[in-house]
Structure formats: C-alpha cells, structure tokens
Amino acid sequence: MLTLRKRHTLLETDTVANWDTDAMTSSRDVYERLGVLEQLVRHLYEKTGIPIPDLQTLAQVSANVRQLLASGNKIAAIKAYKDENGVDLATATKMIESL
C-alpha cells in the first residue's frame, strides 16, 4: 500500500525511484497509484502555468487541428479550430493553448 510518506517523497523529488512497486499488485493499489499520478500531473500543470485541458473539449478537436499541432504549426491550428467551430480568436487560442 502506498503510504503518505511515499506520496510526499514523490511530490518532493519528482521521481518514482522511492516508489515500492512490489506492493502494487491489487486493483486497489492500481487505483491508488492512478490517484498519485493524477496528483502529480495536476502539480505539473500548476507549476508550469499550463491550463489543464478539458477532456470533453479535447474529444471535439478535429484530426486536422491535432495534426497541425503535432507538426508544430500552432497558428494554423488556432485558425483551423476557429473556422471549424465558429468561435472567436480568443476562444480558439485558449482552446489550442490548453492542449
């Protein structure tokens, strides 16, 4: 079972080296590990100032916009999202920056 000390160690050192994976076999332990990972992801989003993307909104982004983002063409992705969804530039920019 993952103890509070181990959670604290993970958050302090940003490493999983202190994580006892041998004890992580039951389904309860898997969900506990998932909870810790979610906390770490939230922590990283907070520290970097990047907004956490909304999963429902993420599912609405077209393959074209995703491909433009993957290729590093952020401006074209914003324009494509704006045109495809009929939103204003500020909304499209916020959406693309949250991905």
Image: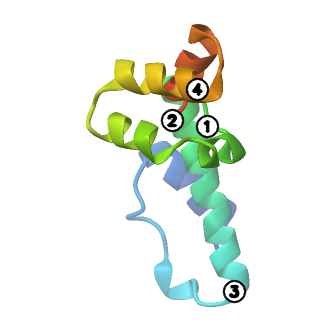
Whole-angstrom CA distance, mark 2 to mark 4, is 7 Å
Foreground: 34 or 9?
A: 34
* Residue furthest left in the image: 71
Amino acid type shown at disc 3: Ser
Asked if the residue at tag 1 contacts the one at tag 2, i.e. Cβ–Cβ closer than 8 Å, the answer is yes
Amino acid type shown at disc 4: Met
Q: Which residue is mark 2?
A: 99
Q: Which residue is mark 4?
A: 95
Q: Earlier in the sequence, mark 3 or mark 1?
A: 3
Whole-angstrom CA distance, mark 3 to mark 4, is 35 Å
Amino acid type shown at disc 1: Pro
Whole-angstrom CA distance, mark 2 to mark 1, is 6 Å
Q: Measured from the top left, where is residue 8 in percent x and y?
A: 59, 51
Q: Earlier in the sequence, mark 4 or mark 1?
A: 1
Q: Earlier in the sequence, mark 3 or mark 4?
A: 3
Q: State the residue at coordinates (46%, 21%).
A: 78
Q: Which residue is mark 3?
A: 27
Asked if the residue at tag 1 contacts the one at tag 4, i.e. Cβ–Cβ closer than 8 Å, the answer is no
Name the element at disc 1.
Answer: loop
Whole-angstrom CA distance, mark 4 to mark 1, is 8 Å
